[in-house]
Image (spheres, rainbow, N blue to C red):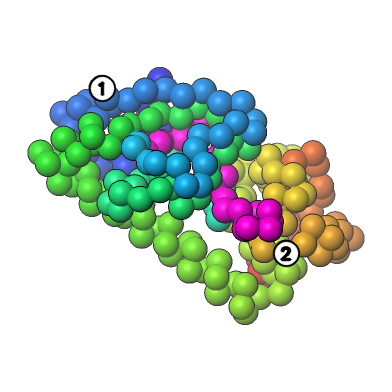
Amino acid sequence: MDLDVLRNAPLFTHLDDEVFSALTAELTEVELSRGASVFHEGDDGDQLYVILTGKIKLGRTAPDGRENLLAILGPGEVFGEMALFNPAPRSASATAVSATSLAGLRHENLRKVIYSSPEVSMQLLGALARRLSRTNESLADLVFSDVPGRVAKALLDLADRFGRPTADGLLVAHDLTQEELAQLVGASRETVNKALAEFVQRDWLRLENRAVIILDLQRLRQRAR
C-alpha cells in the first residue's frame, strides 16, 4: 500500500505520526478493474475508502433507469464517509471507471481513533464540506449555464485534478465514456457531443479515446463562465 498517497490525502495530511500510524494499521487494500462496483445505492455502509490510484464515479439511478453522475474522484480523495455520521443506506453507487486501488477503513475502527484524536473528524467534515460545495456549484450550473458551458467547466475541473502537460497541450485522461460525460453534466449524449464537436472545430481541444487534449485553455475557461 502506498503510504505516501495516504499521507498527502486531505484526511491524513494534518495528522501527527502516531495518529496516522493508528489509522493506517487498520486499512485494507481493495483492487478493482474498470466497471467493478465498490457498493450500490441502498447498501448498508460500514466503511469509507481512500483512493490510492485510479478513478471512482459516484452516481444515482432514477426509477426509470436513467443515471446521473454526482462526482468523479481520484487519488487522495475519500468517499463513503457519510454513513459514519448518518447511519443510513448508501445514497449513491460507487464504481471504478479505470483500474483502481482503494484503502478501506471500517467505521468501527475509525471511531476508536476519533475518540482519542478529534482532529480526524474535522478532516472528515472538511471532506464533506468540499463535496457539498461542489454539489451546490453543479446545481447552480444546471440553472444558470448552458450545456456547452457545463461541458467546458466539467473538462476544466477534470483537468485541474487529472491533467498532464504534453507537447500538444494539456492531456486530460478522464476515462469516461461519452454517456458518462453526459451524465456528469446533466445533459443528453447528443447535446454534449455537439458541444465537444464545436470545441474541436474552434481548435480548443482534440478528442482522444476517453481523454481530451486541451489546446486553448484560456478560451475554454472563458466559455465556462
In what quadrant of the picture does the C terminus appear?
A: bottom right
Q: Amino acid at mark 2?
A: Ala
Q: 10 Å neighbourhood of mark 2: few (<14), some, or many (≥20)?
A: some
Q: Residue at x 67, y 63 (%)?
A: 186
Q: Residue at x 34, y 37 (%)?
A: 46
In the drawing, what numbered circle is on residue 25?
A: 1
Query: Residue 54 lies in magenta, yes or no?
Result: yes
Q: Residue at x 56, y 26 (%)?
A: 32
Q: Which residue is mark 2?
A: 187
Q: Residue furthest right?
A: 201
Secondary structure under tag 1 reads loop
Marks 1 and 2, Cα distance to the nearest angstrom?
43 Å
Q: Is residue 153 left or right of residue 94?
A: right
Q: Is residue 11 placed above or below 30 in the rendered structure?
A: below
Most common secondary structure along the magenta stretch: strand
Q: What span is in magenta?
A: 48-67
Residue 9 visible, this orientation: no
Q: 10 Å neighbourhood of mark 1: few (<14), some, or many (≥20)?
A: few
